[in-house]
Amino acid sequence: MQYSSTNYDVVIIGAGASGLLCAFTAAQRGRRVLVLEKANKVGKKILMSGGGRCNFTNYFVDANNYISRNPHFCKAALNRYSQWDFISMVERHGIEYEEREHGQLFCKHAAKDILNMLLAECNLAGVDIKTHCDINQIEALELKGHSDKHQLEDKRSRYQIKLSQGHTKLSVNCHSMVVATGALSIPSLGGSGLGYDIASQFSLAITKRQAGLVPFMFSDSMKFMCERLSGIALEVEASCNDHTFTENLLFTHRGMSGPVILQISNYWYPGDEISINLLPSMNASQWLLEAKKKHHKSRLKTVLNKKLPKGLVTELQILWWPSSADTPLADFSDKQLTAIGELLNSWRLKPSATEGYRTAEVTLGGVDTDGISSKTMESKQQAGLYFIGEVLDVTGHLGGYNFQWAWSSGYSAGSFV
């Protein structure tokens, strides 16, 4: 079957958060823009994010909220298009939103409000969007008779993309190609390695990748303990490899989840221990010694039930003081209580694995930023090839930071393609 051919100034591969923002930013500059999406509809990850409410940005955005081999790379884009720029657009479209803990901003009604806003901007700017698109081949076109310097100013097509849309075969030529494919996380929503394949084709380096913002699993007795505690949540402090977060932990039938676990998972590697502080606001040893004086007839479990979920205290008793379950506090030695207090403030656990890309909210690592301009998102060695969003080695903490990176990197590329 013959490919029918068409030409655009800019082709963006991926109709997620970064791709859509890049699309209308470029189109507003007078560029003719086509967005290609493999899925049956655009913005699937936007729609499911934040429990269907979309945590679209954060009031407090800083480079320290991001993980990258080059921690400075994200600064230029975040400054070029900040959280305030995106909030301004949200307000202009009359979308109601609310602030939750840690400066996180969510839609008051539904995530589709954000997607509809992006699509409205694309429609207003004249962006073409095609879904059900499978990329078959990408080729850099040779521009004869021009020096490298002149090629940068030459508006002729530099890339040819061959794709299938159902039974239709299309060949699209473009001056600039933007890779906004996302990454490996949540394949059911379109996560794939296509962006890395494109980077490899053009000899761009890719850093080591692993699932990020992802729950932990356990293979020892902790697995069964977590199953019994499934559904119980409490605020804790979680630490690993010199990083610490204080947020809610949720026990699940597979292991541990909740915001604090997702955050610390970004800094965990197989074989590492994590430390859970079950009483982050106090010195547990000192508190137990004082409780011994004031409530000397009480059982330890009774005292701990005032601070921790009862089901959790029952499990901890089996772990740490099984032979003293009915012993009054007065009969515990100070040394015993101090040791239990230290465990409460630093419960050391070794996850067997994470749940992997199936449930990971992001992919750590990606296209090496050393080969990308932090100002324009363009490849330093391949003119007209841009990478934005999660496909790059830039990963945000939980709390709206990954969406802000999508908006900022998308805007940066859209300003230069």
Image: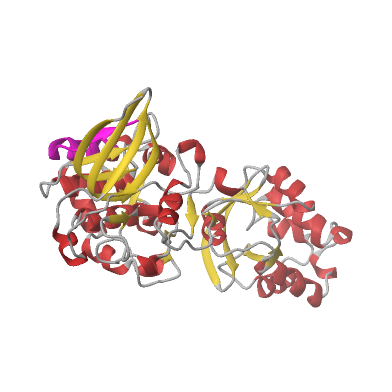
Q: Main secondary structure of the magenta part?
A: helix
Q: Is residue 106 visible?
A: no
Q: Residue at x 86, y 61 (%)?
A: 324
203 displayed left or right of 351? left
Quadrant (top left/top right/bottom left/bottom right) for the C terminus: bottom left
Q: Residue at x 14, y 60 (%)?
A: 153
> How was the colour assigned to the protein in this rendering?
secondary structure
Quadrant (top left/top right/bottom left/bottom right) for the N terminus: top left
* Residue 129 among those drawn in magenta: yes
236 displayed left or right of 272? left
Of residues 103 and 329, the one nearer the viewer is 103
Q: Residue at x 72, y 54 (%)?
A: 313
202 displayed left or right of 376? right
Q: Which percent across, then down, holds residue 81?
A: 23, 59
96 displayed left or right of 191? left
| Position of 121 relative to 70 (above/below) | above
Of residues 203 and 45, the one nearer the viewer is 203
* Residue 234 among those drawn in magenta: no
Q: Residue at x 50, y 47 (%)?
A: 185
Q: Quadrant of residue 358?
A: top right
| Position of 152 relative to 284 (above/below) | above
Of residues 70 and 10, the one nearer the viewer is 10
* Residue at the farthest right position: 323
- Which segment did they paint magenta? 115-131
Q: Is residue 256 visible?
A: yes
